[in-house]
Amino acid sequence: MMNHFMVLAVLLTLRTCYTTYLEQESIVFPVTYLNISKDLALQQLLVEWDVGKSAHDAELAMSFEIQVHRTDENTTVWTEFHNITLDRSGKSLRWIWDSDLPLECMSHSVRIRSKAEASKIWSQWSLWETVLGLDTSNNSGPQIFPDEKIVEEGSDITLCCIGRKGQIIKDFILATDVHVLNHTSSQGQVRLLTVKNVAHHVPHISVCCQESSNGDRYCDYAVFFVGKPPDTPNDFSCQTQDMKIVTCTWSQGGDTYLYGRYSSKYTLFEEFSQKPVLCTVSCSERCSCSWNIGQQRICNITLTVENPLGKKTAMDVFDVTHRIYPAAPLQLWEECTGTEITLYLEHQNKGIELFCQTELLQPDGKVELHNASSDLRVCNTITLGGLQPYTEYTTRVRCGAAKHFWRWSEWSKARTIRTNETTPSGKLDIWREITPVLGGRNVTLFWKQGTSFRANGRSISYEVTWEKVEDGSKPEKISFSSVYNSTRISIDNHSYRISIIAKNNVNYSLPSVLIIPRATGTEEVKEEQVNGTDDGIFISWEPRHTYDSYIIDWCNFPMFQPCDLQWKRFEPNTSSALINSAAFVPGVRYNFHIYGSVANSASLLEKKTGYLRELPPLPDPTVEKVELSFNAVTLSWDSYHTNESQPGFVRGYHVYVSPTQENCNLKGSKKHVLPDESVLCKYTIENPEEKRYTVKHLLSNTKYKLAVKAYSGGGETPIVDFIYIDTPFNSNTLYLLALLVIVPSLAAAICRWKMKWLKEWCCPVIPSPNKSKVLSFKEFKIGSEKVLATSDCIPDMLAVDNKVEAQNLHPWSQLSSRPTEDKINGHNSSWIYPNENEERHLTPRPTPQMHTWFENFAYSSLLSAESNPYQIPETLEAIKPELAAVLYQPHYYFDIYNEDAASTPREAAGRKTSLRYISQTDVRCLGRSL
């Protein structure tokens, strides 16, 4: 044994050394054999070659470079490196190349060179080995390739047309509108067409190829179909009904777009028995195939689906006893009571324990599933309980294996069954409407089958009974058929008991009772407004603990008679409800009455009224009366209705005003902009019963447009029509104008007319001394003026500007002091003349002077004195400033006729020479000193 191991070790060492030698010495092993063949079915080139025996013996790792060349192309179409470790078996090497061009179209050549993997030196190329295409043969006419006419969707396909030897292809076209790439061989004998990304919406590709020939037409046609390989079969499964016949089913998968002889083919194969399944496949919604398995219990079925573009497989391994799929049961007949249905069934699966399920379809569409709890091999019946009397039900049954449940059978044929009649259950829901009449009341009774009531019979009728509560008189009774749900009876003002029962062919229902109390004076209940929502009208009330239920009634159609009275009952702990009805529509006022009920007697508690949704009031108020003044207009619309005929609660009115020519800006109004952007003034009246309004602060003699709109919770309708008015001219303006123009003018005329009289009354004219009788004395003139000596007259008043002199005169006259100012100018000043006693001594004397004035108090003017009474006018002008100062000095006035102020003759004689008197007629009542 030891020797054998030693020999083996030596051999391995020698081999390693030899291999290393070969690699280090870069020995080349050229290709010694090369052979090429083609598989036209698969469109493949099969290349076979070999190297020397020494390379195999050395088990070298070698690399081969393989090139593929087409005769009609100048470049190499394919280059590939192939690495392999040789073995000592000496078998030749193989390589397969898939051509993208049909091999018939051109001749293909292959060459190979080699090297050891550790070496860098390649061997020489082998000679080209060629397989010929049909382009070298002498065909009888042009030919189109490939022969296989099925093209996979999404792939690229290259077609070629080969003409006869020495001939040129004139046309090679596709009849289908697809994008192609053209190529023509150098000799013109072969033409190529390449179609990229073929789509299935092009069901087929038609190709035509034609040679150019002298007069003769040589051509070829071909059609290529576009399709898909089949999908893997989904939901592939097998089952049995009686453990003898096995049925396998599966879905077809997606469309392959291939039909007829190119469509998908299905085959089944049983792996355990290694036998094909002999069955006929049928496909509609699903595909199926059935066959007899005999005594076999374990199966392994392989399904293969195949078409020209590919094939797919699916497998199912199963135990037959676990794949029982029962046949649908047969419903033979049924038996019914008022609440139960018993079904009698028949099964085809004898000896198999089944578990069944019954589907029960209710009248309202609800479906219930009932599972049978008994072994149907013993009792083929199913009982369904808890049903409603005299009600139609639809039933069907399906079953499955009780042990190793696989799936349900198909449903049995559906049957419709009606349960039997029984006594009506529950009570009718009843209500009343009481209308007082002369001598009694009319009571309209209503009834309906509430949620707790069931007729439980084919035909139903109603019986109404009423009797007095107090004296127990004989009841009155009346019956109605099922088509009636109301009646009217007349009763007096006593208390009555009313009952209504329902009757079918079996028996009567329990009575529903109402107590109508004795008629008494009813207290008026105030009606309140409520608001609606999208879901209904919300009603709330004040709860009372004395009642055992509440009832709300209303009319679905309040504008019609009968109004379709409806009512609804509520539990005693309820104080609000959302009332909804399919009959409720926006713009209709619904009235609700809330009653409290105790011991079957109801009392009105509250009234509510409201709309599902308020709409703007219609129609608009009609202005019946317009009262105009120059600055106001009063509108009246007294006949406008605000009752339930309106589509909303009238909450008030808007009065719109605007001049026809300009925007309005009236006091007390709000700005309102119309859709056309014009502006109106809006006044709001919040009392719907106030149907009169006065718009003030208007301009006289102006055109206005007005509109009155009623508004509700739903707003108001757009303004369409206006009332146009013209305010009258303001006559007060004329009166005022007359007062401002005529009265002042008249006053001016009167003043002018009375001016003389007023002047005489207010400012009497001082008599001219020249015209007075007192001047009948001997005349002495200075210029044109007469001069009067003081001895000839007694003055009324003396004014003295010398305080000392005034004090000296005090014993003679009572002194009165009054300061006076007078504006003097040189042009209006009167001349001052010397008196007679001076005897024309005009030369001024430098003696002290005392100045005395006579004054007419009606003019309130003064006689002023100059410093020298003998000065001429020219001299006065020079001393004017001094004179003005003198005129504003205080003056003293003496009443000559006052006895208390009388002076002695001596004092009078002493002042005699200083008194002067001058006419004031021409001096504007201004006195001057004498």
Image (tube, rainbow, N blue to C red):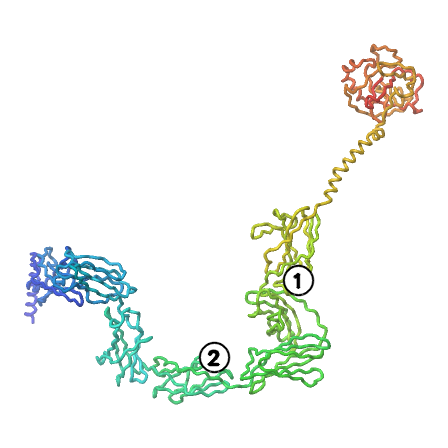
Q: Is residue 152 left or right of residue 756?
A: left
Q: Residue furthest front?
A: 215
Identify the residue under disc 2.
362
**Residue 497 percent coordinates (x, y):** 67, 81
Q: In which quadrant will I find the C terminus? A: top right
Considering the numbered disc 2 on the image, is that residue within a helix, a strand or a loop? loop
Q: Amino acid at mark 2?
A: Gln
Vertical relation: 383 (above or below) 211 = below
The quarter of the picture where residue 406 lies is bottom left
Q: Is residue 807 left or right of residue 685?
A: right
**Residue 480 percent coordinates (x, y):** 61, 82
Q: Is residue 189 visible?
A: no
Q: In which quadrant will I find the N terminus? A: bottom left
Q: Are marks 1 and 2 in contact (CB under 8 Å)?
A: no
**Residue 619 percent coordinates (x, y):** 62, 60
Tag shown at residue 641: 1
